[in-house]
Image (cartoon, rainbow, N blue to C red):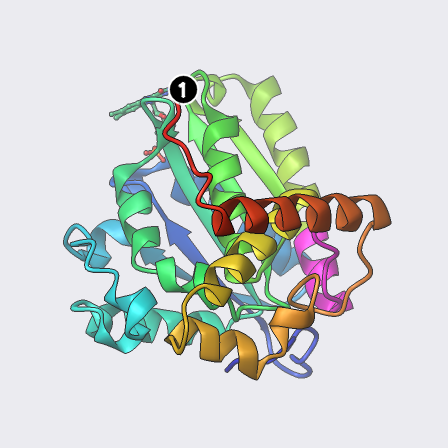
Amino acid sequence: MDAQTDGGSHPGRPLKILAFVGSPRNEQSWTWQIMTRIEAQMQALQPTEVEYVFLQKVGVPFCDGCLSCVNVGESSCPEYATIGPIAAKIDEADGLILGAPVHTFAVTGLMKNFVEYFMYKRNRPSFFGKKAVVTATASGGGHTQVLDFLEGTATAWGCDVVTRLGISSSQMNKPQYVEKVDACVREVAATFVGEINKGELGSPKFAALMNFRAMQNMARRQPDSVNQHFWADRGWFDKEYYTDVPINPWARMMAGYIARKMRRSIRKGNAKPFR
Ligand SMILES: Cc1cc2nc3c(=O)[nH]c(=O)nc-3n(C[C@H](O)[C@H](O)[C@H](O)COP(=O)(O)O)c2cc1C
């Protein structure tokens, strides 16, 4: 499905959530445990079905970097037999949870590699109207890097990231910390369910506006490509964002100004190596 939004279209059935577990520890992981706590709190509010996708079990090899998903079309990916059905499941879902532990102050290689297979969604986003929650666990620090990466990824695919949650697993043996986690989890679940039910498209942050402009510039420079056709078909070359949502006027003005400067610089061949 490539709709502008299918948010709110779930009368008479449970909410459908797809949760991507980016820890190699699968059902032993804190990542999964936090997701199941979110699921339980969602269930307390409204019938909810969560399907867990354990990326370690998905088992795709390292992305070979052929870029055929971007340049030829997603179905040309050597792993499309695995990735295609997962993309179809995202199309069917009301919401996504992306979760990963911090490994050496970054997202796990497992999650990063999985996301590589969706590179085409950055060029040709379509998951508009899907709400997303991102979550990270670490024993000490690095949550922000991982949450930023997961939020940026889901946003670039077209989702609205409605909230984020970082947990310190080394503190989970302390009852007072667990109490605080439970309170946060309740808030996350309430926000997630509430935003899905509202069914409105979210207003983009500045970073998302800039990402839109960068992708717009890129598609303009790719004559007769899959990306250019996709953008032209949706009238996105004349737009300031993918969807017709209200945009903060200052953010819109700044993004437009920077995008015009970027285009001029690219046309003049002004790009420089940098350190
Ligand atoms: C290879 C590796 C690297 C790690 N790097 C960090 C780190 O940079 N910062 C940190 O606070 N914890 C780090 N940890 C600890 C994990 O983030 C922590 O145990 C986390 O809760 C594990 O989540 P999981 O149970 O979902 O796999 C690392 C663990 C591993 C295995």
Q: Amino acid at mark 1?
A: Ser
Q: What residue do we see at 43% from left, 24% from top?
A: 169
The residue lying at 46 percent from left, 74 percent from top is 228
Closest to the observer, 37 or 65: 65
Quarter, ligand 1: top left
Task: Name the residue located 65 percent from the left edge and 50 percent from the top edge.
Answer: 260
The location of residue 261, given as percent across then percent down, is: 63, 44
Tell me if residue 66 comes above or below residue 173 in the rendering: below
Q: Residue at x 56, y 51 (%)?
A: 263
The residue labelled by disc 1 is 139
The residue at the far front in this view is 268
The residue range painted magenta reads 191-205
Q: Residue lying furthest right in this view?
A: 249
The image shows residue 176 at horizontal and vertical percentages of 61, 18
Residue 117 point in image, percent of width and height: 30, 59
Q: Is mark 1 within 8 Å of ligand 1?
A: yes
Q: Residues within 10 Å of mark 1 (few under 14, many from 20)?
A: some
